[in-house]
Image (cartoon, grey):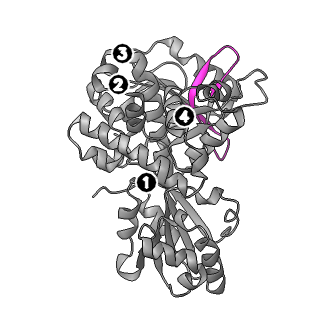
């Protein structure tokens, strides 16, 4: 069993909050996690069981009334239970009463969005981070803002980086030894979530274009979102494309990354970027193989950027830092792939390179960001396929990709 980064945070939340909701994609390990937390003192209920689901739908209040301390798995399948849980915890606001999981973000549904405000803490759980896979304690984000990334040379380069990015983080993928079996699992997974999980939150009769739509999005992962062009690919409207992306975000398949802006910059690109949240699913959707990306760094570049974006998201769930994620691009196409803004206003930047060689020109976007932020700029790095930390001026350095998990 993997030691998950959010386990301590989940236990901590249960000590002072009536309801704790762990949300993330299906098969990311949520059930394993919650069954391991206070399993002896909690009633475990899964709404994947048809009889249990029917009972929850037919009488949500009665279903919840008999529960004192419970874990309810896949709450998105019966979102009306959240209203009944609200009533129950209002009558007895003891901490740790309900531990919930969801494979779709039920908090975006209008009828439940405000039902548990102030009564529930939500913790996001994505597939395994590389630090979880190797059993290390990550400190990359803290060291980034401190500008303290120097250390022993890293040995994870070349084929190792490609293998990690191509595999992604789903536990069941990592249990499969051959690439063919990993791709087979990923394709089956996509078919399942595009029907089963979306059925819980949307009218499936109007979503027959989604498999093709997901393939189009995979071609644009790591790029600015052009809703009109993507919509034209499946002959739907601009608004329909936006709605589809919103639904795919709700089941944690993709994520849109907002642009960072500042009053000091008047001419910036205000379009969000799109990323797949698991690089293994991205590779399978695009039909990429280890051999193809090994022979083409252009193919690997977009995949690697989404891999790093997802890793940073995972590290944020375990960090004590309060961070917001953005991307940056100005009118001259100088860009920073990931901009992190701390709650005190400090800024750090991450640029991703698939090559082993880093040049001064690779820091163009980071330099503009640093100039704009002034004293607010903490540090900027180009993560690359190398083994050493190499300074490139004040508060700038080339850093091995493996610093994310070493």
What SS does tag 2 mark? loop
Vertical placement of 218 versus 101: above or below? above
Q: For marks 4 and 3, give the CA distance.
A: 25 Å
Question: Mark 3 or mark 2: which comes first in sequence?
Answer: 3
The crowd level at tag 4 (other Cα within 10 Å; few <14, some 14-19, many 20+) is some
When asked about the image quadrant of residue 270, the answer is top right
Residue behind mark 1: 26
Please identify the quarter of the rendering in which residue 48 is found. bottom left
Residue that carries the numbered disc 4 in the rendered image: 213
> Is 312 in front, or is 101?
101
Q: Is residue 31 magenta?
A: no
Q: What span is colored magenta in the figure?
A: 328-349
Q: Nearer the viewer, mark 3 or mark 2?
A: 3
Residue 136 visible here = no
| N-term mark: 1 or 3 | 1
Sequence-first disc among 4 and 3: 4
Per the image, the residue denoted by label 3 is 296
Q: Are marks 4 and 3 in contact (CB under 8 Å)?
A: no
Disc 2 or disc 4, which is closer to the eye? 4
Badge 1 marks a residue whose secondary structure is: loop
Q: Nearer the viewer, mark 2 or mark 1?
A: 1
What is the x, y in percent for residue 22? 50, 61
């Amino acid at each position: 069993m993997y030691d998950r980064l959010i386990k301590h945070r989940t236990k901590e939340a249960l000590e002072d909050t009536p309801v704790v909701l762990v949300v993330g994609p299906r098969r990311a390990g949520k059930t394993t996690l919650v069954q391991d937390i206070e399993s002896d003192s909690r009633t475990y209920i899964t709404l994947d069981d048809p009889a249990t689901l029917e009972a929850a739908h037919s009488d949500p209040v009665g279903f919840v009334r008999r529960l004192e301390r419970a874990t309810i798995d896949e709450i998105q399948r019966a979102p009306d239970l959240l209203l009944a849980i609200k009533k129950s915890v209002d009558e007895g606001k003891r901490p740790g009463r309900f531990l919930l999981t969801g494979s779709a973000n039920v908090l975006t549904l209008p009828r439940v969005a405000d039902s548990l405000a102030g009564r529930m803490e939500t913790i996001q759980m994505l597939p395994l981070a590389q630090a979880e896979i190797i059993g290390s304690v990550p400190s990359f984000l803290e060291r980034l803002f401190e500008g303290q990334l120097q250390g022993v040379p890293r040995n994870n380069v070349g084929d190792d980086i490609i293998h990690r990015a191509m595999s992604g983080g789903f536990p069941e993928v990592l249990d499969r030894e051959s690439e063919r079996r990993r791709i087979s699992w990923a394709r089956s997974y996509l078919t399942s979530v595009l029907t089963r999980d979306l059925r819980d939150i949307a009218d499936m009769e109007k979503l027959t274009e989604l498999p093709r739509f997901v393939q189009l999005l995979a071609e644009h992962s790591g790029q600015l979102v052009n809703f009109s062009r993507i919509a034209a690919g499946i002959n739907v409207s601009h608004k329909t494309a936006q709605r589809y992306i919103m639904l795919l975000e709700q089941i944690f398949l993709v994520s849109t990354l907002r642009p960072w802006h500042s009053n000091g910059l008047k001419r910036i690109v205000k379009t969000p970027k799109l990323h797949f949240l698991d690089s293994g699913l991205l590779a399978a959707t695009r039909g990429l193989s280890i051999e193809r990306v090994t022979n083409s760094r252009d193919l690997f570049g977009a995949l690697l950027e989404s891999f790093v974006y997802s890793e940073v998201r995972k590290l944020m769930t375990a960090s004590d830092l309060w961070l917001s994620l953005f991307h940056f691009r100005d009118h001259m196409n100088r860009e920073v792939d990931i901009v992190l803004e701390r709650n005190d206003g400090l800024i750090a930047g991450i640029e991703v390179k698939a090559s082993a060689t880093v040049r001064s020109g690779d820091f163009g976007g980071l330099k503009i960001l640093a100039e704009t932020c002034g004293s607010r700029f903490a540090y900027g790095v180009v993560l690359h396929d190398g083994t050493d930390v190499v300074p490139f001026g004040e508060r700038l350095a080339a850093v091995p990709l493996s610093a994310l998990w070493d």
